[in-house]
Image (tube, rainbow, N blue to C red):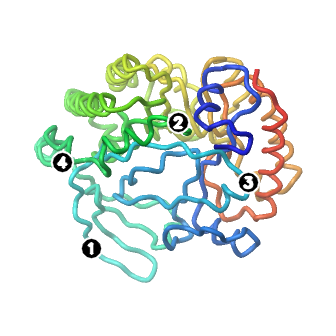
């Protein structure tokens, strides 16, 4: 419950429903491990600390992202409490703890390592070379699906319909009782669930692009199976409890725009999104959130066509203009969009970026926070300046 005795769930439903209310939510997406380490050294009070020791490049999640399920590596991402308590953030978005992805996980196998790098097969069956401090993106070398035989094996062994009741991370009936009168929004489905991003994990980017043309039926067969698989899971979970939103993950854009054409989106993604969203709507779920990086200008109308009505994080360095998007799509819900790169440039840059926020808050359907994990080049003083001003803006800017 927030300080003003309004639950984060109530705020979320009001803001996303474009209802008149006193304020929007006080959330952040998250931080790099090195950022929190630096902030502790620069004055962030260390009260609760982190659940485990982190490296500079590790992800630490905040209240604006689902945290109950392990990531695709099979591990729970550490959650920040001290920053959230310091700025009195609203209660975190929660997610039912369930594995929607590979089960059982592959065994992690190290192939080679030196002082700085390690090459391995991860628990998704992906072979990659990574920096030990996680300060750079991995270099991907090999994926678990190279042909139809690989897919059939993976489907039978790790996406088996009979495994649906083996994928829980908690007792579903006990969880359902506890969240009946919940005070935070609850999400169903999870990353990397989607019909582009998930295939990148299975096949790899370049291989996927070639297969769109060389063997389109193979890609459609995978998407159809995953759609039906996730639909069965959704039927199971929604029979036990109600949810406020459904979540998808599609890292499918760069600075220049979408990695696939609108025609390919409609052919290879749209039918499966429509099927899932239609079912979830029948279970009274109103909000459908997609996490996608890069420039999203040409993707928004496609996702709207698919039934997706929420998006984040709207990276500013990719050229996303939130005011322009709000005017063009007045009922599209947005989260994030504050340029994280202003946080190391100084107060004048922060102020200029904050000037956009008041307008966006006033129109509803918007929760402001940084446009991705905050990197270690942001000082604690700069973050305090940004976040204190943003909180004051949230408190003073009426929604609608």
Relative placement, left or right, of 89 versus 164 is right
The CA distance from mark 3 to mark 1 is: 44 Å
Nearest-to-viewer mark from 1 and 2 = 2
The quarter in which the N terminus is drawn is top right
Which numbered disc, 2 or 4, marks the residue that appears first in the sequence?
Answer: 4
The CA distance from mark 1 to mark 2 is: 42 Å
Q: Which residue is mark 4?
A: 158
The percent coordinates of residue 335 (x first, y second) are: 62, 36
Under circle 3, the secondary element is: loop
The CA distance from mark 1 to mark 4 is: 23 Å
Q: Which residue is mark 3?
A: 87
Nearest-to-viewer mark from 2 and 4 = 2
The residue located at (46%, 58%) in the rendering is: 77
Query: Can residue 213 be seen in this snapshot?
Result: no
The CA distance from mark 2 to mark 4 is: 30 Å
Under circle 2, the secondary element is: loop
Question: Which disc number belongs to residue 111?
Answer: 1
Which numbered disc, 3 or 4, marks the residue that appears first in the sequence?
Answer: 3
Which numbered disc, 1 or 4, marks the residue that appears first in the sequence?
Answer: 1
Which numbered disc, 3 or 2, marks the residue that appears first in the sequence?
Answer: 3
Q: Which residue is mark 2?
A: 185
Relative placement, left or right, of 201 versus 93 is left
């Amino acid at each position: 419950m927030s300080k003003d005795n309004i639950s984060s769930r109530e705020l979320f439903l009001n803001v996303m429903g474009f209802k008149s209310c006193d304020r929007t939510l006080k959330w952040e997406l998250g931080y790099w491990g090195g950022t929190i380490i630096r902030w502790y050294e620069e004055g962030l009070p260390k009260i609760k600390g982190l659940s485990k020791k982190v490296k500079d490049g590790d992800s630490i999640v905040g209240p604006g992202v689902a945290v109950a399920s392990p990531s695709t590596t099979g591990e729970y991402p550490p959650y920040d409490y001290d920053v959230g308590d310091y700025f009195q953030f609203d209660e975190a978005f929660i997610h039912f703890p369930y594995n929607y992805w590979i089960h059982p996980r592959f065994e992690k196998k190290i192939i080679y390592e030196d002082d700085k790098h390690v090459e391995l097969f991860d628990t998704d069956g992906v072979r990659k070379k990574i920096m030990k401090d996680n300060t750079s993106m991995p270099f991907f070398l090999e994926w678990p699906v190279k042909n139809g035989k690989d897919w059939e094996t993976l489907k039978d062994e790790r996406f088996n319909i009979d495994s649906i009741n083996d994928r829980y991370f908690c007792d579903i009936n006990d969880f359902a009782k506890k969240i009946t009168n919940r005070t935070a929004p609850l999400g169903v489905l999870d990353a990397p669930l989607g019909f582009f991003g998930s295939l990148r994990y299975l096949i790899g980017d370049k291989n996927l692009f070639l297969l769109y043309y060389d063997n389109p039926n193979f890609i459609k067969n995978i998407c159809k199976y995953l759609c039906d698989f996730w639909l069965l899971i959704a039927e199971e979970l929604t029979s036990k409890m109600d949810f406020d939103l459904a979540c998808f993950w599609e890292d499918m854009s760069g600075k220049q725009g979408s990695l696939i054409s609108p025609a390919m989106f409609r052919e290879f993604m749209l039918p499966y999104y429509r099927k899932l969203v239609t079912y979830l709507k029948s279970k009274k779920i109103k909000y459908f959130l997609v996490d996608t990086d890069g420039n999203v200008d040409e993707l928004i109308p496609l996702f709207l066509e698919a039934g997706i009505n929420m998006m984040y994080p709207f990276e500013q360095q990719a050229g996303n203009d939130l005011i322009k998007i709000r005017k063009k799509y007045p009922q599209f819900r947005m989260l994030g969009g504050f340029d994280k790169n202003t946080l190391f440039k100084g107060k004048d840059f922060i102020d200029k970026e904050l000037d956009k926020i008041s307008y966006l808050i006033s129109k509803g359907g918007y929760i402001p926070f940084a446009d991705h994990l905050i990197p270690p080049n942001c000082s604690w003083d700069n973050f305090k300046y940004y976040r204190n001003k943003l909180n004051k803006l949230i408190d003073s800017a009426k929604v609608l």
